[in-house]
Amino acid sequence: MIEVFFAAAKLPTSGALVLLVPEGGFSGGLWGEIEEASGGQTGRAVAAAQFGGNKGQTAVVLAPTADLSRLVLVGLGKDPLTARALEEAGGAAAPLLKYDEHAALGSLAGEIDLAYAAVGVALRSYRFDLYHTKQKPEEKRALGQLTVLSPDPAASEALWQRHAPVVEGAFVTRDLVSEPANVLTPAEMAIRAAMLAELGLDVEVLGPDELAALKFGALLGVAQGSRQAPRVVILRWNGAGGETTPLLFVGKGVTFDSGGISIKAAAGMEDMKWDMGGAGTVVGLMAALAGRAAKVDAIGIVGLVENMPDGNAQRPGDVVTSYSGQTIEVINTDAEGRLVLADVIWYAQERFKPRVTVDLATLTGAVIVALGHEFGGVFSNDDDLAAKLIAAGAAVGEKLWHMPLDESFDKAIKSDIADMKNVGGRPAGASTAAQFIKRFVNKTPWAHLDIAGMAWADKDTPTVPKGATAYGVRLLDEFVARYYENS
């Protein structure tokens, strides 16, 4: 991640300068210093570019003064400036700084806290370059340092220190989700999650022998078609002393999903390396909570498997016995994520007795049909919990839409030979999948986030470059901070 520093608001003597400009807001402060240093030429260049500070508008002036390499202007518009708006403004500036090793960030908008804009710059500057061996100079990451020019540097730095660990947590998730499946096997992902012990997390890894002894029949049924043995990783953060009833976050971690015997079409199957996106989010969230020393007790648990179609793979029509003792007829082996969650959720609730459970999974294509790539779907047995998650997501730009659960959906997953079947047909596919998971939830308030449309982005957005999004890390961190950290 880029290094961020804080200093008084004065014209820098090197590098690039980003200025956030409200509509019609060219006056005084840093702008006056730039105009004086350039003899008025910068103002003429900006006028020629017809930049007026409209929201989202950008302009670049090369060598605006004898000292600066470029001036990047980002419009803020007229609307009241929220933290999210400032993050998006910072994100808009980031791609325009790719040739500069150092940049400064200032504003002509008066008393605003630019630490939020620095968060946006950092989030948008993420790159996953691990496997590039030949890059042109212009393709390489350049920006390494950002100096925030603040009227109150100490206050801005304190705000940045609150949010920087969450950005780091999001990067943990993006790194995991970006890795190819031949590298990030269940065993390797468990190793990387265990490395977070250096942040103060307690880490426990359950291997295949332990899972067999515990009778994780649903999870092991998914894993049996792969040569990569499964893992379950438990991450514990005792930020409230370990004496309160913990929050529980559960992630689906299918490190590659071929569909099993019900094999997927070849086109696009390479994307299934990110079918562990829910688990990646849980790992990144736990890194964020530990990194910022959140005053809450929380547990993250992820079920890690690979779904492959070898000669030992489970077949459509097989019946498996879950950890809960409930039996499941496997109609479609490509509906595997809910089988993983069934065992992990029941086990975690039985063992840790949480006050609230949230699971995340790239679970269904049906939720993409319903909500596209704009919203994740939230299904819950508690309307208040769902409302809190939706509000937290809105605050950080990770939107959720409340989707229905209903007893009528139970009829779709009724099996003739077992307690249930793992699919309910095409109608209401996201809801019947959530209804299946609900059968493995006790009376604890619970929410299921179907993030199939949100874990990966095919194009840049204001604070997320194309690729792994880490959707859910900031949402759940905000959820914890708003509703549980001081309770």
Image: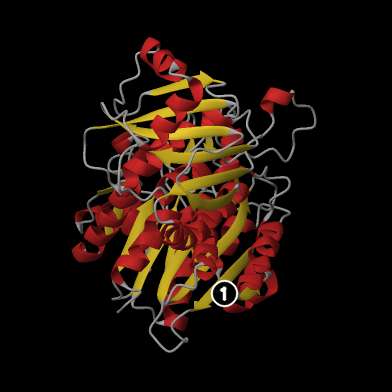
Kindly state the secondary structure of the residue where label 1 is placed. loop
Point out the residue furthest to the top here: 48
Q: Which residue occupies the foreground of this view, 179 or 407?
A: 179
Quadrant of res 86: top left
**Amino acid type for the residue under numbered disc 1:** Lys
Mark 1 closeness class: few <14, some 14–19, many ≥20 residues within 10 Å: some
Residue drawn at point x = 36 percent, y = 51 percent: 113
Residue 446 image position (x, y, % from top left): 31, 67
Task: Give the left or right position of residue 444, taking residue 62 as reference.
Answer: left
From the viewer's perspective, is 298 left or right of 449? right
Residue 253 seen in the current view: no
Viewer-side residue, 19 vs 325: 19
**Which residue position holds label 1?**
215
Q: Quick one: quadrant of the C terminus?
A: bottom left
Q: Position of residue 11 (x, y in %)?
A: 50, 38
Q: In this orientation, which residue lies closer to the viewer: 346 or 476?
A: 476
